Amino acid sequence: MIETIGLSKRFGDVRAVENVSLQIREQEVFGLVGTNGAGKSTLLRIITGILKQDAGTVLVDSEVVFDNVETKKKFFFIPDDPYFFVNGTAEDMKKYYAEIYPGFDTARFERLLKDFGLDGRRKIAGYSKGMKKQLSILLGLCAGTKYLICDETFDGLDPVMRQGIKSLFAKDMEDRGLTPVLTSHNLRELEDICDHMGLLHQGGILLSEDISSMKLSIQKVQCVFAAGIEADSAMKDLDVLSHNVRGRLHTITARGTREEITAHFGSYPTIFFEILSPSLEEIFITETEVVGYDIKKLILD
């Protein structure tokens, strides 16, 4: 497990990370979202021991990370702009990482290069941005580390390649207990793969929860009340997170299970009533608006 406790980091007057406390459980996909400049890259560099925090603690399997070579062997970190040797090829990078990571699977790497249509002898400088991202992820997967840390994981990948990479993550999680930590500025990009999501803004964590728990505990209701029924009365005793009206159609997002919300509205006659599954973006928007943040200004499409 990866745990950060009260983590803070500044660069001069810039607050990059501020009092961040997180738990990343083993064999779960942890997604970290936030706009550019929110502090995602800095946080990942502290977690992997590249940067030293100004305050707080980072523990990986109960061990500190910074200046701890043995603990760092459990990570493969893929930055947003991966580094490759000048004039290097995929074969060169394979040989390099095979020396660093004893468990590097060279046979699998060569097989995946062919599957993804990458020429191992071609200079990486001639690769497109998407091809470079594919190569870095394949190197990371074949390194055989316990944790794979990816910054802006799917940036530059087309939809087909994204699905292929997600399938590889799922396979490695099942086969060898891989724990991926993925960042993005796009909630929708990570929604279908992550078990747990954290929202980072201005260096601090606004929200960090299991996706399944969030989706089970918040319901989105669309309804048209019968004549004489006041919406305020119908919403009484509900923990309403948001309420929008368009004509006679009410859209109400409330905290509670599907059964509880259905039973509540059963006491109020409606012409139309439907419970929808809110998207992860809708959940984040409602949760953060409750605590005073306009998340619509923070989330990028």
Image: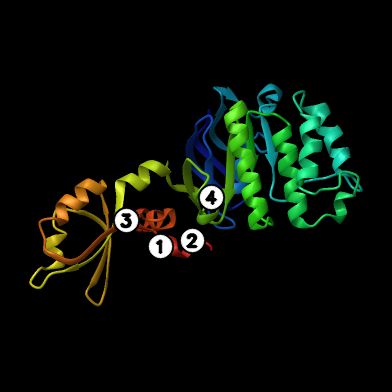
Give the mark nearer the N terminus: 1 vs 4: 4
Amino acid type, mark 4: Leu
Mark on residue 294?
1
Give the mark nearer the N terminus: 3 vs 2: 3
Amino acid type, mark 2: Leu
Give the mark nearer the N terminus: 4 vs 3: 4
Amino acid type, mark 3: Val
Does the CB distance between marks 4 and 3 fall below 8 Å?
no
Give the tally of numbered discs: 4
At mark 1, the secondary structure is loop
Does the CB distance between marks 1 and 2 fall below 8 Å?
yes
Q: Residues within 10 Å of mark 2 (few under 14, many from 20)?
A: some
Mark on residue 111?
none
Q: Residue at x 10, y 73 (%)?
A: 227
At mark 2, the secondary structure is loop
142 lies left or right of 258: right
Question: What is the distance, in whole Å, between disc 3 and disc 2 at their CAs?
Answer: 15 Å
Amino acid type, mark 1: Asp
Mark on residue 290?
3
